[in-house]
Image: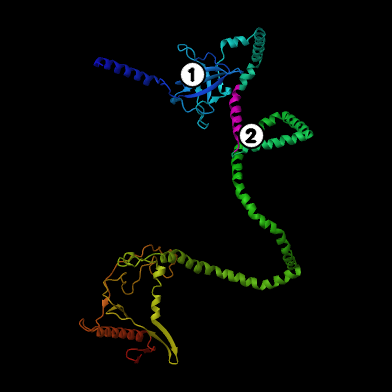
Amino acid sequence: MSLFTVGIIAIVAIVVFTYLGFSKFSLPFQHQFTVHALFPSSSGLRQDSLVRIAGVNVGKVSSIQQVSGKQLSEVSMTIDDNGLPIHQDATFAIRPRIFLEGNFFVDVNPGTPSSPIVKDGHTFSPQQGTYPVQLDQLLGSLQANTRQNLQILLKEFGGALAQAAPSYNASIPYWYPAYKYSAIVNHDFLGTQPHDLSNYIGAMADVSGALDTHPQNLQSLITDFNTTANAFARQSTALQSAVAELPRTLAAATPALNALNAAFPPLREFARTLDPGVRNSGPTIDASIPFITQLNLLARPQELRGLTADLAVAIPSLAKLTEETIPLMRDQVRPASSCVANEVLPWTHLTVPDPNFGASNGFPPHPVYVEGVDFLPGLAGESRVFDANGPYVRILLGSGTLTYSLAPGLFGQALAPIVSETPQVPPSGKRPPLAGGDIPNYPCETQPAITDLTAKAGAPPSAIDTGAGKNASSQAFEKAQAEVGLRQLRKQLNAEHSSLRINDPVYHTGVH
């Protein structure tokens, strides 16, 4: 073929495929989704009439057939993909198109998402299809006698409206509260839990059945209600005033009722808890009757006189004791308790900060009440003995390589040089300041609370020369240190307790 012929064929093919693409023309042998709807009348619907969902074309009517033996028309429709899915509760309505379009179309409501989706070829029931009423059908229904009766009805209805119009107009302002409160009542009838309404209907059925079983009681109920209504009618003014106060009463009662409703669950739990005790109250009362009988005997005049005579001697002493206890409690016990609670106890829970010893090097700080008794293990090195020669004390000394003077008459030894001491030793004869200065008996509870135990580091204590040089042997150096310690100990004990004998394990001699 020539190039011209090939070009003409290509142009025709492009035009055809473009038309098919934009017109959504169904290709031969292509399957389309089809549904069937039953209508009482097709009402001018034709083949190829449009099928729409919310005004959008989603398909066409493929065929219209009369159902044999029934006054029904089966309308078959092909639905495009943009009209799917369609659910089982879908509805179909035949509606007239606008004036310029002419003919009719099928308006489809695809149903709710919770309803199952129909399959291809599904047939919908006549109850799901509606069609418009035509003018000829309307005129055919209005026969002469029907039109005459309609005229009479409209005339009488107009007269009734003319007479009822003022009352009708006067009732309009009450419509809003009536509908509003009716809606609230109807909503409350639904209940708050599942099956509340069904249980209410079941209970009403039981009540209605009981009333039907006893018609005489129902008659008496109506008669009594009539009497009650008559009494209300006679006291209409008072009833109107009571009804006017009812909203305020309900407003005040609602919080109380809510609180009462909230109290019911714990009240039920309390009742269940109280039930065993209530069941045991009878045996408890039976068991307590002999005790009550004895108390009744003790309360007799002859018994009370003897008890009163015995108490007459003790009561003055008790009264005097109580009177003398008041100053003790007020002036001694109360300040001491306040001091312990407000001053001592908070202080014992503080920690002593130390820049050289902490959690980083294996010495985490402890509260004062823990560190305050750390010295007690040292008592294992001291023991007291009593024999025929009298009491004496044996002390195990631990020596170090360095000896320091801690205070007048006190010394100590260490294995390593002491760099500083924390806290600083106060000057001789000085003590930490108090809130009351040197005022005697200044109340402890008025002292400012201690919140920080941080102390400044001071110079190390002065070292004592042991007489052994640095080049001396280790054994000679330790012996010199021990001798210095013993001399210091003898000097201190001789100064404080001149009658105490010391058994020296080194020299085996007794000195005073």
Stretch in magenta: 172-191
Give the secondary structure at mark 2.
helix
| Quadrant housing the N terminus | top left
Give percent across and percent down for residue 95: 51, 17
Examine the structure image and report whether residue 346 is included in the region drawn in magenta: no
Examine the structure image and report whether residue 175 is included in the region drawn in magenta: yes
Q: Residue at x 67, y 57 (%)?
A: 277
Q: Disc 2 designates what residue?
A: 245
| Amino acid carrying mark 1 in the image | Ser
Give percent across and percent down for residue 407: 31, 77
| Quadrant housing the C terminus | bottom left
Asked whether residue 249 appears in the rendered view, the answer is no
**Mark number displayed over residue 62:** 1
Chain-order first, disc 1 or disc 2: 1
User: Height in image: 392 above or below 114?
Assistant: below
The extreme top residue here reads: 144
Cα–Cα gap, marks 1 and 2: 70 Å
